[in-house]
Amino acid sequence: MIAGGFGAGKTTFVGAVSEIVPLTTEAVMTAVSEGVDDVHAVPQKRTTTVAMDFGRVTLDQDLVLYLFGTPGQSRFWFMWDDLCQGAIGAIVLVDTRRLADSFSAVDYFEDFGLPYIIGVNRFDGVLAHEVSDIREALSVAADVPVVPLDARDRESVKAALIRLVQQSVSFRSRSASGNSAVSSGIG
C-alpha cells in the first residue's frame, strides 16, 4: 500500500514504477471539495484520487508487487481495511510541508500491525528536513526506515519498494521469533 496525506505524491509514485499502465481513479476537484480538501500547500493540484491507484512492478523473477495507492483524504479511509488484507506492507508517503497529514496513516499501520516505512517525497528535488527530524516529528520507532525519495523517479521509487520488502521480511522474522519464544515459554 502507498498511503499518506492529500497531495503527497501517491499517484505519481505508482505511475513512476508500474510496469503496466496504472489504473487511476483521478477526478477533477470541484467546488464541492472547497473547504474540505486543504489545497493551500498544493495550489496547483486540480485532481484527486477518489478510490485507489493500482500498478504492478516485478522486483525479481519470483517477486511481483501489486501497488495500491490510497486516497489521502480522511473521508476515503473506510477503504483502507480492505486494501490492507493480504498486504505485505505500506509506504507512508510524506510531504514535509504538511507532516501532520501523515500522522493518521502512521497510526493506522501501527494499529493494524502492518509493517511500514516512511517515504519522504523530495518535492523539487529538495529534502527540506533532516531524516532524524522527520522521524522525531512523526514519532516513529527506530526500526521504521525513513527513506528520502523522489516519487517521479522510477529508480528512487523502486529502491523504496525494495526497502519496504526488506522491512516486511524483518518484521515477520521478528514476529515469528517472538511467537516461538512465547510458545516455548521463553520471555
Image: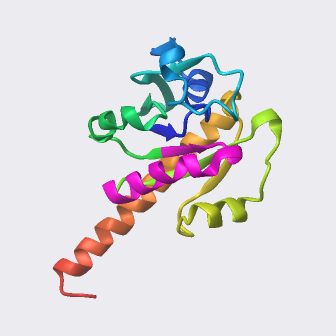
Coordinates of residue 82 in the picture (x, y in percent): 26, 35
* Picture quadrant of residue 122: top right
Looking at the rendered image, the quarter that the C terminus falls into is bottom left
* Side (left or right) of 187 relative to 61: left
* Picture quadrant of residue 13: top right
- The residue closer to the viewer here, 89 or 71, is 71
Res 152 visible: yes
Residue 16 vs 161, above or below: the answer is: above
- Give the residue displayed 17% in from the left and 78% down from the top: 183
- The residue closer to the viewer here, 33 or 140, is 33
Q: Is residue 48 magenta?
A: no
The magenta stretch is 91-112
Q: How many marks?
A: 0
- Give the residue displayed 67% in from the left and 28% down from the top: 154
Res 20 visible: no
* Picture quadrant of residue 17: top right
Coordinates of residue 67 in the picture (x, y in percent): 45, 30
Looking at the rendered image, the quarter that the N terminus falls into is top left
Residue 93 vs 107, above or below: the answer is: above
- Give the residue displayed 48% in from the left and 39% down from the top: 3
Principal secondary structure, stretch drawn in magenta: helix
* Side (left or right) of 182 relative to 150: left
Q: Is residue 98 magenta?
A: yes
Coordinates of residue 91 in the picture (x, y in percent): 51, 44
Coordinates of residue 89 in the picture (x, y in percent): 41, 46
Residue 82 vs 54, above or below: the answer is: below
- The residue closer to the viewer here, 168 or 81, is 81
* Side (left or right) of 119 relative to 172: right
Instruction: State how the image is colored.
Output: rainbow
